[in-house]
Image (cartoon, rainbow, N blue to C red):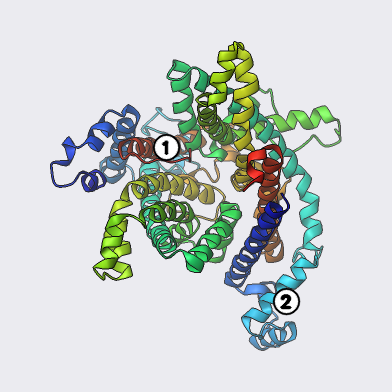
Amino acid sequence: MRGFLLNRLSQSLVLLVIVSIIGFGILNLLPGGPLAQFGLDPGMTQQDIERLKGLLGLDRPIWIQYLDWAWRLVHGDWGHSFRDGAPVLQVIGSHLFATLLLMGSSTVIAISVGAWIGIRGATRRYSLFDYLATVGAMVALSVPTFWFGLVGIYVFSLKLGWLPAGNMSEIGDDSILGYLHHLILPSVVLSLVHVAIWSRYMRTATLDAISQDFVKTARAKGLSERRILMKHVVGNALLPMITLAGMQLPSILTGALVTETVFTWPGMGRLFLDSLGYSDYPVVMGLLMFSALLVILCNLIADVVVALVDPRIRLA
Amino acid sequence: MTALAMNAGPSRWWHSRAARRFMSHHLALLGLALITLLTLACVLGPHLLPYDSLYIDLRARFSPPLTGYHFLGTDPLGRDLAARLLMAGRISLLVGFFAMLLSTIIGTLVGVIAGYRGGWIGASLMRTVDGFLSFPSIFILLALAAALKPSPAMITVVIALTSWMEVARIVEAEVHSLREREFVLAGRMLGLSGAHIMFREILPNAMGPIIVAATLTVARAILMESYISFLGYGIQPPLPSWGNMLNGAQQYLASAPWLAIIPGAAITIAVTSFNFIGDGLRDALDVRDDRV
């Protein structure tokens, strides 16, 4: 177990270094590079910019600049927003909760609905339900999330008037119920693609588990089909889903960005777009690095949890 | 169709097992039919319609579909929606196709080299792939699109740069398993160069998974283009694309819902079709794939 942990940890560290190199590369690719803020000032001459470059150490070799940047990153100095001068980490922190809430609730929907569809499809293989679920999943994967959001707003907010069309709460209304009411539509919209993904994986995993010997043994013991399904099949089918949950994170973040835009949800995705609009590169870069860190961390956690739950992996 | 031909060998390809299996995959045939229709409509349609996609008719602003002279209605400037939809389709399908081509080339190169060479070259290439996969693709896509000049060609390149990793992974796994086969060994003993073995011997045998991945990449690229154009960083007006037609649609959702519904439906139909075709090819070419 210790060896496995160390191994996975060192892999994640290597990945972090690579991610930071890619991030640094993009930072330098952006027009104006790290000095973009000053390029916007009409009073700046080329000489001023050259002087600033020397002052900020941007005339040093690129690899020294990278090490310096990475060093500050590690020490929590992620720069300051061009817009209001607030530290980048603080800006991200103030938008984190809204995004995590949206991602969390949509993941709960995706896993529960997706698992139900997948298990039902696998136990009734080649039935009409299975066929419709397969086709439906492929269509769901093809629907642009923002369009599904617009159609959702049109039907449930404008026509039926059941759900609010955007924002996290009404002004002056801080009740939990109000938040939940606002949460329903965006989290359902964000979950659509992932319901499709989870149902496909769950179907495959359940079919794999059903064909295992221990299921035959359980049948031979005379256990009821229901008990076999719930205890032996689903338990084993859910195991690989933990890894999948970690792997799905980048795609959930991508979906969250457009969902937040459509529903004016005050999360990280909206922050990213706003910052991009203002050429607020420190925040853009901060979010890029932060999301990658989140992804690597969650994958690491998922792997460790699987290893803890599944005794077979400890041997590896 | 060349895809199937390559797999079938010298005899007539439409008698091959792969072609027969593809033909019995109803959804794939449906997808193929829809894409053919859509492509034909986008190529020929603008010549047949009486309206130019850029012609502004301020007297006919916000005409709903199926009323007056405009079959699909008009937009806030009174431009014919059908004409714009078909011109947008040209851009979106072209961007999707060329982004697929470019990302498949990059992904295949990286995958073949990483899979064949192995060792530290392979490891570092594949870790780079993992690194790229750790970023939510739309964050990188938007940052790059905002940084570079947003012409259709540049958008294509940017989409390709953020979607080659899947292909690279698939090709690497395939090449890795082919590397130890007899025909590769024979090639080495004949003294063939590494490049010859990689691209003339191994690559043709790995075509199945590449074709499937490429088809699904078209679907993904069309979706990605629509995402960034919807957010305003993709194809820039007045050039229409399916994504940027939706860009301003939300503010008119109550009064002119067709502005949002119609282009989105076009995207969904195109992407679903490519996904259906990809699924059919996967069955036909016997590609084992754990992805959805």
- The numbered dot on residue A68 is 2
Question: Looking at the picture, how far across and down is residue A265, in whole percent?
Answer: 71, 42
What is the total number of numbered labels drawn onto the structure image? 2
- The numbered dot on residue B241 is none
Q: Residues within 10 Å of mark 1 (few under 14, many from 20)?
A: some
Q: Which chain does the numbered disc 2 sit on?
A: A
Label 1 belongs to which residue? B266
Task: Please tell me in which quadrant of the rendered image residue B83 appears.
Answer: top left
Task: In this rendered view, identify the residue nearer to me: B188 or B80.
Answer: B188
Measure the alpha-carbon separation of dots 1 and 2: 48 Å
In-image side of A271 versus A208 (left or right): right
Q: Which chain does the numbered disc 1 sit on?
A: B
Give the residue type at disc 1.
Answer: Ala
Considering only vertical position in the picture, is B10 above or below A286?
A: above
Task: In this rendered view, identify the residue nearer to me: A2 or A141.
Answer: A2
Give the residue type at disc 2.
Answer: Asp
Q: Which numbered disc, 1 or 2, marks the residue closer to the eye?
A: 2
Task: Please tell me in which quadrant of the rendered image residue B182 appears.
Answer: bottom left
At 74% from the left edge and 43% from the top edge, which residue is drawn?
A100
In-image side of A16 versus B119 (left or right): right
In-image side of A51 versus B51 (left or right): right
Q: Residues within 10 Å of mark 2 (few under 14, many from 20)?
A: few
At 76% from the left edge and 64% from the top edge, which residue is drawn?
A81
At 57% from the left edge and 37% from the top edge, which residue is drawn?
B252
Could you say whether the residue bearing mark 1 is in a helix, strand or loop? helix
